[in-house]
Image: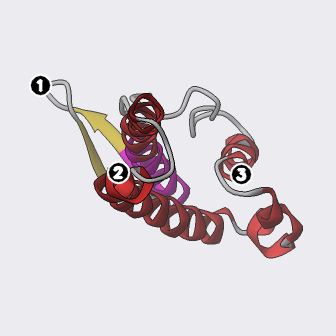
Amino acid sequence: MYLPPEWPPEVRPPSVPDWEASATAWLLDALPADYRQYEVLRRHPVALVSMASAHVEAAVQAARAGYRKAAVDLKAHLPPHAIEAVLDVYRHEGPRLVRLSRSIEVVGQALRGEIFTATLRGHGRRSGPAR
């Protein structure tokens, strides 16, 4: 079974029985701990994907905004080397969050029954739900 490059290694492939349990655990790990208290999210992983996607997208936007204004906002409070270190955190976290968002997207596609197929260029393509 083909899995796209964005597929998280912590999630078993959809061809494995009970793979949804690993997807649910991984999605819960991607969110703040408070999300674990909601049974509906554990019982319905597609709902969990929706919430995880929204949460991570908001984090991506927050990281971008924080990066744009960190130097100005912190100039009066931190020395230049500390400001540069904060910017380095944003430079690391922004791309990590974008990768996480892409991984959530492909796991969500699989949870909705979509099947991935490899293309000649090596990029994945998805087809509709399995029937």
Left or right: residue 49 versus residue 80 is: right
Q: Is residue 114 magenta?
A: yes
Q: Which residue is mark 1?
A: 120
Q: Quadrant of residue 73?
A: bottom left
In the drawing, what numbered circle is on residue 67?
Answer: 2
SS of the residue under disc 1? loop
Amino acid carrying label 3: it is Thr
Q: Which region of the structure is painted magenta?
A: 98-115
Quarter in which the N terminus is drawn: top left
Q: Residues within 10 Å of mark 1 (few under 14, many from 20)?
A: few
Given residues 128 and 76, the one toward you in this image is 76
Q: Nearer the viewer, mark 1 or mark 3?
A: 3
Left or right: residue 43 versus residue 19 is: right
Q: Which residue is mark 3?
A: 24
Q: Nearer the viewer, mark 1 or mark 2?
A: 2
SS of the residue under disc 3? helix
Distance Cα–Cα, label 1 vs label 3: 31 Å
Residue 61 horizontal/vertical position (percent): 38, 63
Distance Cα–Cα, label 2 vs label 3: 31 Å
